[in-house]
Each structure stands twice: as C-alpha cells, then as structure tokens.
Image: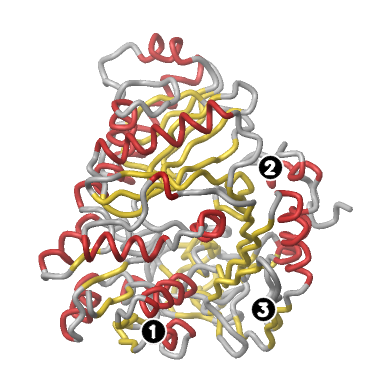
Amino acid sequence: MANIVSPLPGVFYRKPGPGKPPFANEGDTIEVGQTVGIIEIMKQFTEIQSDVAGTLESFKVNEGEMVNPGDTIIVIREG
Amino acid sequence: MKKLLIANRGEIAVRIARTAREMGIETLVVASEADADSLAARAADNFVVVGPAPAPASYLNQDAVIAAAVDNGCDAVHPGYGFLSENAAFARKVAAAGLTWVGPDADAIEMMGNKSLARESARKAGVPILRGTDGPLDPDADAVEEARGIGYPLVVKASAGGGGRGIRFVHNEDELLETIEMARGEAASVFGDPAVYLERFVRHARHVEVQILGDGTNFIHLGDRDCSMQRRSQKVIEEAPAPDLPDAVRRTIRESSVELARECGYSGAGTVEFLYDPAGHEAAFIEMNTRIQVEHPITEEITGVDLVREQLLIASTGSMSVRQEDIQFNGHAIECRINAEDPHNNFFPSPGLITALEWPAGDGIRIDAGVEAGSTVSPYYDSMLAKLIVHKDTREAAIEGALEALYGTRIEGVKTTIPVLKKLLDRLEFAAVKHHSKFIETVDNLMEAP
C-alpha cells in the first residue's frame, strides 16, 4: 500500500468543479502522474498526482474537507 | 435604513461598518464559523454565524444570508465586493424578501455580467470599444473576413466569460478557425453558452478605470484610477488619478462612463474598466463592475467623498449627496494590497496565526485592514489581509510615502507580499509609467533584482 499525502494545507476536492465527474473513484486503475484530486488554498488550486501505479484503495479525506501537510488523502494498492 | 446586514468578511466588512456607524445605522455582519472571532465580526454592532468555513456553505449561501437579515430585523443588505455582490439572482432574492439592496438593480448587474451585451451597451453609450465583432460571432459568418477587418493578433472571448476567463489568443490567420472551434466548445461546456466574439489584442496595455456614481436621476464620475501593476490579472498596486494619460483620453473615458451609467439608469457605485494602449493613445472598454471596488479608497482620498456613504444614501434615500461640480481632485493616492503570500516562493499562500502586527502612522497614511495581531489567516478565503493607502501632493511623494509606510509595517507569523510591493514601488518603470498589466510576469527574478 502507498499513501498519497497532501504537500500543503487546504481544502480537498475530488472533482475539478461543481457538477463535474470526480478525477478518480475507488477501484480505479491509477497511473503514475495521474491527477487524483485538487487542493484549494486561498483561491489557488494545486493538482494532487499519484506518484505510484496501482488501484485506488480508499479516500481518507472527504470532499470539501480540510487537510494539513503530510495528511494521507488516498491509499493506493500498488501493482 | 435602520439596520444593515453586511454580507461580506475581512477588510471590506470592517470598512462598511465604519461608515454605517458614522451614519447612525446599526450593523450586523455575517460570519462563517471560521470567522466568528474575526476583526470584522467585532467591527459591526453584532455578528451572526451563517455556516461552516467553506464559502459555498456560508458567505455564498444565499438563503442563509437572507435568513440572517430577516430573522435579525435588518432592512438592508450591503454585499461588499466578491462573493454575492454581482449575483443578479441574489439581488432579486434580497428585494423579494422586502430588503433594500445596496447596489444597482438586478437587471443592470445581469447586463454587465454578459460580456457581449455589456460591450454592446457601452458602444451605444459612446464608450470607446476595441475593434471587434458587433455582439457574438455569427456561426455562419465568414470569420476569416471578420478577423481581417480586426487585425492580428486578436483574442477570442466567451460571451459568458469574464474576470480573465474564457479568453484565447490568436497570433495569425492559420490559427483562427481552429481556435474559434475550441473556444466555442470550451465556452459551451464551462459557461453553458457557446457564443464567442472576436476582439483586437493590445500589447503592453495599461489598465485604467473610472469611478462612477448614479442615483437613477443624476450620474457623475469621481475621476480615474490606474491599476496596471497586476499579477496574473490580480491587481497589486493602484493609484489615482491615472498618471500619464492624455487630456483627451481622460476626458473621453470619464464622460463616456457617465453616459454608460445614464444609459442604464444606474443606481449605486460602479467602475468602468478600460485598457489603455500607450503606443496608440487609445482607451477601450473592458467591462463594468457593478459594486464597490477593492481600490475605492484612493478615489476617496483624492476627492474627499466617502463612497460607501454615497452607496448607503442612494439605497436608502434614492439620492446621492454630491453633484459633478462638487467633485474636486487633490493630490495623488497609491494603494498597496498586502496579501498573505510568499513572494520568494512563487506567491504561495501563507495562512496561519499573525503573531505580531504594527501599522505605520502619519500624515496621509490610511490602513484598511481585515486582520490584527492574534488573527488567524484562514486557508478558506482570499489572501488579502489589508490595503495600505498613501495620499500626498504629488505622485513622486506618494510613491516615496508608500515605500516609507511599507518599511514601517511589520507583520509576523505569516509571509506577506510586502517585500514585492517595495520592489515594485522602487522600479524605474513604475516611476516612468512604463509598466503595463503583464509587467510583473516579464521581470525575471523580481525579488533578486537590485
């Protein structure tokens, strides 16, 4: 298992915008460099990308929830 | 008007509360759970928590904001800037709830919100506009022919866009049709309206704007401002009056802005924004903002008119207290926006606790702040902490005074844009008015430059 952690504080979103489909869902195959969510801080948006390939096991943070640097956002089952 | 709901946060909420108090109007400010202990919450007579920290759940929650006003006996709503201030549907809901909306009516907000409609009404009022298509580009028209009449480079803009969004650049004819196609597709998916229009592109343009006031009967201007010092289309330093503007251009933008206000029977404070081409000595309409502007204090400083007071008077009595002949211009004012961002790290946001804070004091210095020592800068909202405004007899003295005031400012606990403001005020290009709205992006290593 590999954890994708937040590099910065902010609000986590799974979707690029309201009414849009999520970047990724549980069970999806994830490639290295694939965008899996965004973090908003003070109106600036940072894309969160996976640094491993595998299957998206679970989200550890809910849509719109606050995260701090180092918090695990997503767990990926490698392979 | 007896009791005003301030539907905003930060420095503008504090600013509105100050004038309302002077006018004997009771104030109630909305706050998110994150802002219950903010300077704004204490600046008003009372505050009411309308929802959790994320803005969509609090400051943008229309029903919660209106309920806060109705349940607490308010009779008017001031939206400030940003958030719900240019939301026509919200303005209608406020009126439908029997409350006075401090701003122009919903129809005016809606018209100016649509870029090609706004351009069309500006043209009718005699406001100079950039060469471009009259209204949206007809999908069946010969776009190549239209574009030849405009000239390259040009931009394709979404009619429903705005604030710098939905704009595509076309360098030459080879790129034209493909870019229009992409822009239509993007506009349809992002704004729900595929309409686009073509407009000439001006290189090295400055941003100038005119402050207007209207009460439905009388329409006046309070002079111009220059806001060319921008980073990624966000204003960083503003000044009034706009420097180095030919008299004829200044007269044209001021008078035509008043005509535009008259054309729409405008009621309230508004700003007509122009880009100015210093090479061709031409100004052209960008858009009209139907609200109080962030940089309104520099106009207040050089005219002595309290714009928030006029907004409240227009909303409550139907008349403003000043006529065009009352407006006199004195000296020069500069505003610096102090943001919680790290200029040494690509302007990365810097939330956190402000552990120490000292503002400069002195003749001609005004601070409009939304924070104080002990405030927590929340990651949920805009990064602007305060505006430092300096008013002096001349532009040179105002630049010097602003620099001195920044050196006299101390903010600890969060990173701020103060270091970059000092660098920018010290640039020879700024002194000589050779800067433009993309200037900051063109300077390599701004922070390292001597």
Sequence order check, earlier mark of 2 and 3: 3
Q: Residue A30: image x %, image y %? A: 48, 62
The chain carrying label 1 is B
Q: Evaluate whether residue A58 shows in this view.
A: no
Tag 1: Cα neighbours inside 10 Å, few (<14), some, or many (≥20)?
many
- Total labels drawn: 3
Mark carried by residue B439: 2
- In the rendered structure, are the residues bearing label 1 and label 3 in contact, judged by CB atoms less than 8 Å apart? no
Residue shown at 56% from the left, 32% from the top: B276
- Report the amino acid beneath label 2: Phe
Quarter of image, res A78: bottom right
Q: Which residue is mark 1?
A: B44
Q: CA distance from mark 1 to mark 3?
A: 26 Å
- In the rendered structure, are the residues bearing label 1 and label 2 in contact, judged by CB atoms less than 8 Å apart? no
Mark carried by residue B150: none
Front disc: 1 or 3: 1
Q: Residue B153: image x %, image y %? A: 54, 21
- Report the amino acid beneath label 3: Val
Tag 3: Cα neighbours inside 10 Å, few (<14), some, or many (≥20)?
some
Q: CA distance from mark 2 to mark 3?
A: 26 Å
